[in-house]
Image: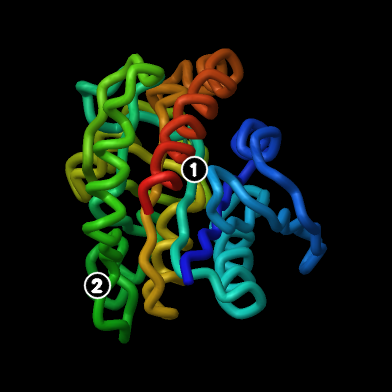
Amino acid sequence: MTKIGIIGAMDEEIEILKDFMIMEDTKNIAGMNFYIGKLKNKEIILVRSGIGKVNAAVCTQILVSNFNVSHIINTGVAGAVHEDLEIGDIVISSDVIEHDFDATGFGYKLGEIPRMDTYIFKADEEMINIAYEASKCETIMHSTKVGRILSGDIFVASPDKKELLWNIFKGYCTEMEGASIGHTSYLNNIPFVIIRSISDKADGTAHINFNEFVLQAARNSSNIVMNIIENI
Ligand code: ADE
């Protein structure tokens, strides 16, 4: 049976979906409120994970182990790495990488996770396609790209770091949770997709842009998630 786990890291990233959902119950586990109910007639569990890879990984595992979700969607905002992305634009994950995983001292590539069969976690093809179609609706005024999303426990706010992320990984945008959600979904064999809307350009003005555009970007991403849910 379809039961969709939806994760946003911050209040701003889940509040629109929370307003639209028909709430049946709430459970608090590991300090996170899991909102149980229906959205667009689909069973969903909506949760604010908190910021960063550990919070997001713990949250994803709870969705799998305690709530038995069949699909996982991460919604939120991100800093642009691809030069063609503007504030408000959408990135749908083709795959995700933890860009701050660094075992280069052992001769591994940056991002590579020692003794795992992969460090590039692929989003579900069907969910990507549904998300792409969902992004074409008239309420989404911005362009959509399908591409690699990078995550790290770093708020990227420098042109040098941004250039490095593009040169090394060819990541389209960077945030702080998606890859750990992808990683945890991969370990549990659960299909996932990450939807992010651009709040800033991950450069020297990132913190200013973030504060100004976080709500608008979070709204764009939430709108797409609502359209996705209808079609899963
Ligand atoms: N989320 C939104 N913008 C970000 C940035 N520049 N770095 C990391 N996470 C972000």
Find residue 75 and name its label.
Answer: 1
Left or right for 108, reference 184: left
Which residue bears the numbered disc 2? 108
Tell me which residue sits at (30%, 48%) in the image: 93
The residue at the far front in this view is 41
Tell me which residue sits at (76%, 58%) in the image: 32
Left or right for 62, reference 84: right
Tell me which residue sits at (58%, 45%) in the image: 39
Residue type at mark 2? Tyr
Quarter in which the C terminus is drawn:
bottom left
Towards the viewer: 182 or 52:
182
As drawn, 48 above or below 197: below
Find residue 188 and name its label.
Answer: none
Tell me which residue sits at (57%, 76%) in the image: 68
Quadrant of residue 106 within the rendered picture: bottom left
Confirm whether residue 160 shows in the render: no
Left or right for 172, reference 154: left
Q: Which of marks 2 and 1 is in front?
A: 1
As drawn, 85 above or below 182: above
Q: What element carries label 2?
A: loop
- Residue 222, horizontal then vertical, whole percent: 51, 34
Residue type at mark 1? Thr
- Residue 45, horizontal then vertical, whole percent: 63, 58
